[in-house]
Image (cartoon, helix red, strand yellow):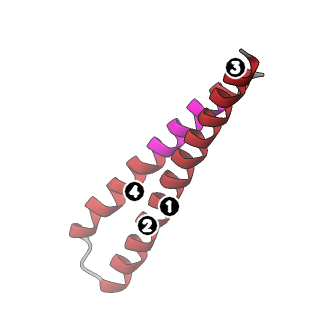
Amino acid sequence: MQLSARLAAIASVVFGLICLWFAVDGFLSLAGIADPEQASSARSFAWFWSFLAFAGAAIGWTTWKVSQAQTDEDA
């Protein structure tokens, strides 16, 4: 079971990094948008991906810590 928890933590962090890449790409593309309504939508889109990146990283970190605590109890 420890391997599963650690694998889930790593997969969650990878998910967070992919979401962060989308967020950064979204924020960098704002400079090329002339329409204020489209820029607002793109900014909201980028913030949504930022939230997903934070959530993925937080879940991964928490899962990793829980798996470490369980390993310490077993030893």
User: Could you give the CA–CA distance between mark 1 and mark 2, rounded to whole angstroms?
Assistant: 6 Å
Relative depth, front residue between 7 and 46? 7
Q: Position of residue 55 (x, y in %)?
A: 56, 54
**Secondary structure of the residue carrying numbered label 4:** helix
Kind of residue at badge 1 = Phe
Q: Position of residue 26 (x, y in %)?
A: 35, 60
Mark 2 vs mark 3: in front: 3
Kind of residue at badge 2 = Trp
Tell me which residue sits at (58%, 40%) in the image: 60
Q: Position of residue 62 (x, y in %)?
A: 61, 42
Reading the image, the residue beneath label 3 is 3
Reading the image, the residue beneath label 1 is 51
Kind of residue at badge 3 = Leu
- Number of marks in the rendered image: 4
Q: Which label belongs to residue 23?
A: 4
**Is label 4 in contact with label 2 (beta carbons under 8 Å)?**
yes
**Secondary structure of the residue carrying numbered label 2:** helix
Q: Of the two numbered discs 3 and 4 on the same chain, state the one appearing first in sequence.
A: 3
